Amino acid sequence: MIPVMRGQQERTHLPQPDFLPVSRDELESIGIDHPDIILVSGDAYLDHPASATALLGRSLWDAGYTVGVISQPDIRNQESFTTLGPPRLFFSVSSGSMDSMVAHYTPARKRRREDAFSPGGRLLRPDRATLVYADLIHRIYPSSPLVLGGVEASLRRFAHYDYWSDKIRQSLFADAPADLLVFGMGEQQLITLSDDLESGKDIKTIHDLPGTCWKIAPKKWEEKKEEINQEILEIPSFTDVSSNPLLYAQSHIQILNEQNPYQGKIILQRHPKTFIIQNRPALPLSSERLDQIYDLPYKRRAHPSYQDPIPALESIRFSITSHRGCYGNCSFCALAMHQGRIIQSRSRESVLREVCRIADMKEFRGTISDIGGPSANMYGDWCERWSSQGACSDRECTTCQARRSGISQYLSLLREAREVPGVKHVFIGSGLRYDLIPDEPDIMQQICSHVSGQLKIAPEHISHDVTILMNKPDLNVFDSFRKKFEEAQKGRDSRQYIIPYLMAGHPGCTVTDMIKLVEYLRDHHLYTEQVQDFTPTPMTTSTCMYATGIDPRTGKKVHVPKGEEKRIQRAFLSWRDPAGYDLVKTGLRQERREDLIGNGPDCLIRRNSNPKEHTSEKLDVIRPKGKSIGKMTAHSLRHNDH
């Protein structure tokens, strides 16, 4: 055992356990009375580097702190929260890898039937899980410090539009009886917090930790602000953004522009009973630090106490995270607000060590399902500004000449991984940013050699008016990529297919835009099941548009499809599905496109009254017939989890 100095006392650094303890018996078996930290999560405990519980728990253990885990506690049974006793330092509470409302409800606000992050797919977490867990823990252990984290808390840290209640809600932190909120990827914040508490600091006085939010009573703020040396930006209050769409849009842009870990201002937002203060985001992790985190001894299995399989594990068990961060800035995505825009890549050696560990597992059959990140081909990307000034707030990294592409490093890494003994295939399972792929035939051929048959890309739409609001590349970029991909198929033994992700109902999208999209799919013999109805989720620019009817970047009004129009748009993406026949027909008539109703080769639906007949035509689909594509649980788990 290695002695570790924490504060004024020497503590014993216990070796990493096979699994983080989840019961009193497991604590006692490794000689622990009370763990230093207890992680409470709405996900099942997967000891896998794609799981926040495992990443955070093992990172804290590596730093000399013991950690217990309470996964998916039964909110009707107090003993679910007391099984490990109180922690010595603090509770850390998360809803899990997804916002619990996103996990529970479809875009039509209908209850989902299963949860991929639970044993047997059962629905085991409550709605608004972070708040529910925090309230119960505070009631049971009112003197224990309580920290919020995870994607739900992180993206609801300010006043925000909540789609499921259709109103502006307070910061989740304002509603919860918690002491601190950790936003972003939280390893360094929790370790530093543990060090501070170990040294004797009171959690209620820790106000300078990057990557955290703290709160203060309104009457104490005037005195406290004199102690803060950094510039403070006060954004419109909860009361203001609740009643004024222009102020909501203004606050969104202000928050967006201050997420720079080097230059961002401290942000203050007033709420009726408390003030929420966000410190600068945590600094990006170095390659060496990322390597250290991902080299920890994860079992890549669910905790042995589970009797039923956890569906999400099957899709990520033999996948590898190569990097963090995304500078794509898609309007409907909150990754930049969570992981940041700076790409943080692991070293080649660290990734290959992980490949070797996987190859040694008895369950491994030779296929690495993915080596990637939020966007696979951002691995190794670099800009000299990132390490000292952060990403620029006045320009897009995707089109900036100062950015250096790491595509050659990435493809080399895939080749080397495939050469590891026991490995037969290494695939790109994450999405690719097709607009970042250099116009070189050899690179496309190399990419195709790591495609399992289906290449995931996300054009989302083809209408210029929509893609510009989505902040996605224009149609000509997708067309160019599609043609290069088709050219690369010549001479291949097996046909590969593009799987484009498409979206309906995004702000700015009209039924006319959806007709254009469907005509494009028809004309190019494309069809996909990978479609989604836009869901407004907290802290995205698209959600701001949905809630206010304003593009916050320009101040211009934006059409927001809702109700029947939104259902019509969604039906167009599955225009050959008999269930949507009436909605498609209604949409075509509304837009005076009866020319697309009939028996001609260009018609979308038949004119007859039996909708089933319009599905009889042959179709050259863009995915192999009979293969279903699962929901992107792996992508959600790997990249939105902390």
Image (cartoon, rainbow, N blue to C red):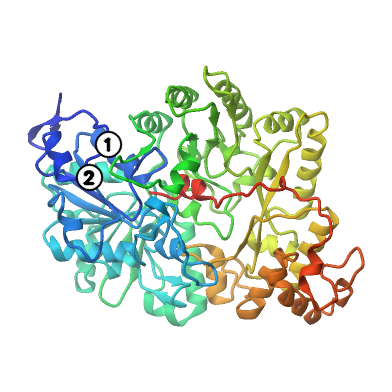
Q: CA distance from mark 2 to mark 1?
A: 8 Å
Q: Quadrant of residue 519?
A: bottom right
Q: Is residue 155 above or below residue 564?
A: above
Label 1 sits on what residue type? Phe
Query: Would you say residue 558 is visible in this rendering?
Result: no
Q: Nearer the viewer, residue 101 or 72?
A: 72
Q: Secondary structure at mark 1?
A: loop
Q: Residue 250's x, y, as percent?
A: 50, 70
Task: Determine which of the numbered discs, if any, sits on residue 22 in the image.
Answer: 2
Q: Quadrant of residue 140?
A: bottom left
628 lies left or right of 222: right
13 lies left or right of 412: left
Number of other residues with Cα within 10 Å of mark 1, as a class: few under 14, some 14 to 19, many 20 or more: many
Q: Classify the position of the N terminus by image quarter.
A: top left
Q: Residue 437's x, y, as percent?
A: 69, 38
Question: Residue visible at 52% across and 77% down?
Answer: 246
Task: Mark 2 and mark 1 in contact? Answer it, CB < 8 Å.
Answer: yes
260 lies left or right of 87: right
Name the residue that disc number 1 marks. Answer: 19
Q: Residue 91's x, y, as percent?
A: 21, 53
Query: Would you say residue 111 is visible in this rendering?
Result: yes
